[in-house]
Amino acid sequence: MTAVEPLIGIPGPAGDTYLGNLHAFSSDPLGFLTSCAREYGDVVRLGDHNVLLTGPELVERMLVDRGGDFNKKGVEDSGRAARGRGFPTAMMNSDGAEWKMKRRRMQPAFGRTLAVKAAELVDAQGERMLASWKLGEQRDLHGDVSVLVLRLVTQLMFGDEFTDRDAALVSRLVRPIMELSTSPLLLPDWVPTPRHIRLKRGLRDMDRLLRRLTSDPAAVDAERAPVLHALVTGTPTPSPQELRDELATLVLSAFETSNDAVVWTSVLLARHPDIAERVRDEARAAFSAAPPGLSRMERLPYTGAVVRESLRLYSPAWMTSRDSTADLRFGGFTVPAGTTVTVSQWVNHRDPRHWDRAEEFDPGRWLDDSARKMPRGSYFPFGLGARACIGASLATTEIVHIVADVWRRHRLELVDPRGITPRPALALQPMGVKVVPRAW
C-alpha cells in the first residue's frame, strides 16, 4: 500500500537529495535511530513514508491499542528480512485472520509444559557444552552457545536433537539471512550473487532436514514434540509448505535470539565481576538445592534480573516495523495509511528520559519497584500486544538456565573487550566475542 498523502509537519532529518536517509541508516542504524529520537522527539519522519515512534505511550498505542491497524507484510517480507522470502506462509509472516488462525493453532504448545521440559533439558545440553571446554583455552562463545541452543530447540520441537551436521547446516543458513538483512542494496532473488546462492542452497538443505525429522511417526507425539504435535493436529491441518515454513522460522528465530541473549549477558558479566560473582553464588546454591526444572528457576531471581537488564541494553529484537492500514494520530500528527511505522527497542530501552542511568548495567533496578513502574512501551524485548513473541517465557527460561550453568562453573575472560561490537541484522548479533574460561 502506498501512502495517500505525505507526512505533513512531522520533524526529521532531511537526508541526502537522492537517497534520503538511506546512507545514514545503513552505515550506523543504532546511532542513526538514537540521534533521531534525541533530536526530533517522540514522532520522527525518517523518509517520505517512514516514521519512527519513540514515546512509550505511542509504542503501546501502536503495538497494543491499534495493533489491528498494522500489517507486517510489506515491511519485513519485502526484501530486507530474508526469512520472508524463504518462509512466506509462516505465522510470523502472516497478517489479519490468517495470522490469528495460525497463532491459535500453535498457542497450545507454548504453555507451562514446554517451559518445564526446557528447564529439564537445558541442564544436559549445558553439561555437554561445558564438558568440551578446557580452562585457559580460547572459545568462540557465540559458536558454542549456538550448538547448545539448536540442540535444545530441536529437542523441544521434534523430540530429538540436531546432529552436529544438522546444527552446522542451520548455522550456515543464518549467515546469508543476516547478510541480506543488513545489505542496503537488495537485488532480485534471481540475480545469482554469492549471498543468494548460499541462501537458496541453505533453504534446500533446511527443507530436506525438516522432511526427515517430521517423517518419524514419533515426532508428532504430544509429550516428545509438543510444538510439532500442535501444528500437525491443529485446525486447519497445515499444508506441507506451511509446516515447513512454521518449523523453519521457529528454529531460526529461537536459535538466533536466545543465542545472542546468552552471549550478550555473558559479555556484560565479564565486564562486571562483582555482578558475576553474585550470579555464581546464587547459581551454585540453586543447582545444589533443586533438581532440574522450573523449581530451580524460582531460586535464580538475581540471575533473572541480570538477564532482564541484558535484554534492556542488548535486546536481540532491536527494531520492529509495521505498515499502517488506516490513517492514525500519533503525538498530534497524522500518520497516513501506507506509512511504515518503526519502533526501536534499542532506542526506548536506553532513553534517559525514562531510565535512570540508562546506559549502565544495573540488574538491581529489576529487584525493586522502579522498573515495574515504567510505561509498557519503555521495555519490550519480546514485543507487545497480540503479536508479542509466542515463545517469550520459554526463551527466558532457557537463557536464565544457560547463563546460570555457565557462570556457576567458570569465570569468562574477554579476549578483546574493545573488539566486541553489536551487528544490527535481523537480530542484534554480538560480533567478536572470544572468551577464555578461568577457574573461580
Image: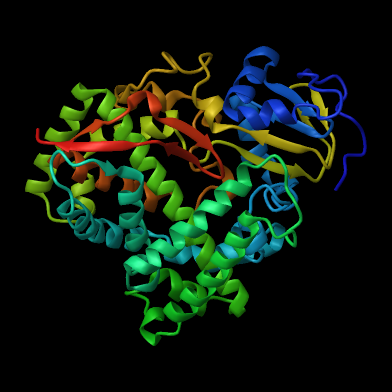
x, y (%) of residue 242?
Answer: 61, 72
Residue drawn at x 70%, y 43% as measured from the top left = 322
Question: Hey, which residue is sitting farthest left in the picture?
Answer: 288
- Please tell me how many numbered marks the rendered image carries: 0
Tell me: 358 left or right of 57: left
Note whether 372 is above or below 408 in the view shown.
above
Residue drawn at x 19%, y 33% as measured from the top left = 279
Residue drawn at x 55%, y 30% as measured from the top left = 377
Say which of 350 and 195 sits in front: 195
Say which of 434 and 337 sits in front: 434
Which quadrant does the C terminus fall into? Answer: top left
x, y (%) of residue 121?
Answer: 25, 61
Say which of 397 and 185 sits in front: 185
Q: What is the quadrant of residue 85 in the picture?
A: bottom right
In this picture the colour scheme is rainbow
x, y (%) of residue 419?
Answer: 39, 27
Note whether 12 is above or below 296 in the view shown.
above
Tell me: 240 left or right of 158: right
Tell me: 43 left or right of 355: right
Note whether 87 is above or below 320 in the view shown.
below
x, y (%) of residue 342?
Answer: 67, 35
Q: What is the quadrant of residue 155 in the picture?
A: bottom left
Tell me: 373 left or right of 160: right
Residue drawn at x 40%, y 87% as measured from the top left = 217
Say if residue 307 shows up in the picture: no
